[in-house]
Amino acid sequence: MTTTNPLFARILYGLFLLLTAYYVFFEKDYMTAASNLCIAFIFDPFNPEQPFNKRPLWQKIWLYVHLGIAAAIFGYGVGIFDR
């Protein structure tokens, strides 16, 4: 299995976060924002070789908060279009 260069992965992670912010604040397209935020997960900003249960607590919290925000944006997007 090949791994992505950590610097390249962090740059892509940051770009997807910026793209998410663009869709939330300027386009008001919450479904696209949620999908971009979930795609950012592919580019793990930390060491992808390290198992999740061996990561420091702050990295686990960061990833759980990231997942929670993605779920919240997705839920909000679904709720907006449910009207």
Image (cartoon, rainbow, N blue to C red):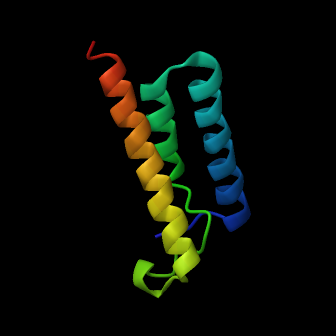
The front one of 53 and 39 is 53
The front one of 51 and 75 is 75
The percent coordinates of residue 22 (x first, y second) are 65, 28
Outermost residue, front direction?
83
Name the quadrant containing residue 28. top right
Vertically, is 4 above or below 71? below
The front one of 2 and 71 is 71
Q: Quadrant of the C terminus?
A: top left
The percent coordinates of residue 44 (x first, y second) are 55, 62
Number of marks in the rendered image: 0
Name the quadrant containing residue 76. top left
Q: Residue at x 26, y 17 (%)?
A: 82
Outermost residue, bottom direction?
54
The percent coordinates of residue 3 (x first, y second) are 56, 67
Q: Residue at x 50, y 69 (%)?
A: 61
Outermost residue, left direction?
82
Outermost residue, top direction?
83
Q: Is residue 2 visible?
A: no
In the image, taking residue 38 as reference, residue 26 lies left or right, namely right
Q: Residue at x 58, y 35 (%)?
A: 20
Q: Is residue 37 visible?
A: yes
Q: Residue at x 57, y 75 (%)?
A: 58
